[in-house]
Image (cartoon, helix red, strand yellow):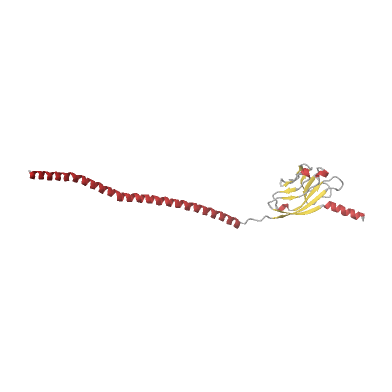
Amino acid sequence: MKIVLLLALLTVGECGSSESVVGQTGQNVTLSCTYDFNYYGALAVCWQQGDIPRRGSCNNQLISTDGLKVIERTRASSRYQLLGRLDEGDVSLTILNLTDSDAGRYGCRVKIPGWLNDGKHHFDLTIKTAPQTTTSTLNRETSTETTASHTAGTGAESSVQQQQQQVDSLQSFIGNTVRVSFIVFIPALLLTAAYRFWRTNQRPETDRRLNQSEGEEMYSSV
């Protein structure tokens, strides 16, 4: 009975915890893993894909730390980051720009001193495809923007046309006024000048006739 109980405890200790996480393509996801830094001090931690082995370090390792800094990236790219406060025991793994191939099981192994004391945390990551923007949606958006731009442009053109029409109307009015002035006032001025010239020529003739009449009257009196 004691042997069975011991095997059960060992099995639980080896399996560790497991958590399901859902991510979306093109976005980032963080798999949370922490330990008591104040109690243990800095501990070595490694991340891997797949189940954590019962003993030793991580297989298929992604990234590892000595508790204060990242010390190894066996095969992982820069998409795998430890962005938490390592000096506070936050060794959470952040995967950048998720792809469909990132789906699967991940393991965080915290190397706690002692026999079979390592902390093991598993995460089952599921990836959902981000909604695709259809061509028709893009066309509608583009069409809306084009219509708005065309409307704005048409409004500006209409305003310019109205201003130009007003200027043309004013110029036409001024031109017509000038033409009417020439037609009406110039003949009037010519007639006035002709009349004055005629009056000027008539006055000496009248004076001559008056003088002649006065002479004849004086001669008759004599």
Image quadrant in which you'd find residue 67: top right
Please give the name of the residue rendered at 88% of the width and 54% of the height, measured from the top-left corner.
Answer: 7
Q: Is residue 54 left or right of residue 140?
A: right
Which sits in the foreground, 97 or 53? 97
Q: Is residue 147 left or right of residue 129?
A: left
Residue 221 place in picture, x, y as percent: 8, 44
Residue placed furthest toward the bottom: 136
Q: Is residue 192 visible?
A: yes
Which sits in the foreground, 82 or 74? 82
Examine the rendered structure and indicate whether residue 1 appears above or below residue 117.
below
Q: Is residue 52 visible?
A: no
Residue placed furthest toward the front: 221
Residue 179 place in picture, x, y as percent: 33, 50
Image quarter where the N terminus lies is bottom right
Residue 92 place in picture, x, y as percent: 76, 48
Q: Is residue 178 left or right of residue 202?
A: right
